[in-house]
Amino acid sequence: MLYKEICFDAMEVVKKAAAFVRERHENRKDLVIEEKGRQNFVTEVDRKAEQILVSGLSGLLPEAGFIAEEGTSTKRGETFNWVIDPIDGTTNFIHGVFPFAISVGLTEHDVVVAGIVYEFGLDEFFYAWKGGGAWLNGQKIGVSEVTSMDQALIATGFPYTNFKYLKEFMHSMDYFMKNSHGLRRLGSAATDIAYVACGRYDGFYEYGLHPWDIAAGILLVNEAGGKASDFRGNENPLFKENIICSNRNGFHEFQETIQKIMLSQ
Ligand code: IPD
């Protein structure tokens, strides 16, 4: 399999879905919004964009299955699966706030081998393929070089349906507010991770995530010279529901801090 080729072909499919989402975003007054659960929304735009993605990507690699947020296809591939979030940051999308993004990853035996995050606000295409580095709109990107926590800008996502670790999470925010350069919450995990890959953020962590929020991002960070793991430090956090990622210099300190605070019980 030529990972680079499949990544560029998949980008063309993402462009089609993005054109649809952008058009609907500009004319969003009739948006039909459903509540999947408390504070967990889906719109008809998420569903239609996912259909565009699934149908386009099916043509690229017929043997591949899908792990898609809105459940357009439940076909699972033995070797390859596309992991899709048609709009990561749906709440931002609904309110007309940026960022929100399309996130598409391709896994081979559960390892991400191609990944694309397209962020609408800044019109930025982040993409990577295994062994090929990480890219942003045609320029190679890399993680930051910050070495200590007091120089690091950290990003996170606030829990909104899973409050199991809320107390520990509040404690972690307290820690990073006092011991880092600052803490940010944009509302799109895929974008947050892409920002670690290009060095805007030095680290990101969140719990209660799904594979489609992070698949493309995991590869972007790894190919950009950084590292991603779950809170315990296990590599490949794709199905672990929690993630930390950062540059390599600061990873050890960051991961140990998160593990100590978040898994203290
Ligand atoms: C959500 C966003 C948000 C993160 C949530 C995700 P969705 O994705 O990435 O930043 O905090 O955990 O579920 O639901 O908008 O695709």
Image (cartoon, helix red, strand yellow):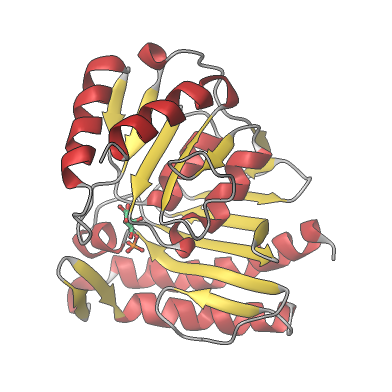
From the viewer's perspective, is residue 14 above or below residue 229? below
Q: Position of residue 155 (x, y in %)?
A: 35, 35
Residue in the picture at 22% in, 39% down: 168
Looking at the rendering, in which quadrant would you find the N terminus? bottom right
Q: Position of residue 147 (x, y in %)?
A: 51, 13
Image-quadrant location for residue 34: bottom left
Image-quadrant location for residue 225: top right
Which quarter of the frame holds ligand 1?
A: bottom left
Looking at this view, name the residue that lies furthest to the right.
1
Residue in the picture at 35% in, 77% down: 45
Q: Position of residue 7 (x, y in %)?
A: 71, 60
Q: Position of residue 230 (x, y in %)?
A: 47, 45
Residue in the picture at 72% in, 41% down: 133
From the viewer's perspective, is residue 45 above or below residue 170? below
Looking at the rendering, in which quadrant would you find the C terminus? top left
From the viewer's perspective, is residue 183 above or below residue 151? below
Residue 125 in view of the camera: no
Residue in the picture at 53% in, 57% down: 238
Q: How many marks?
A: 0
Residue situated in front as seen by the camera: 178 or 153:
178
Residue 195 in view of the camera: yes
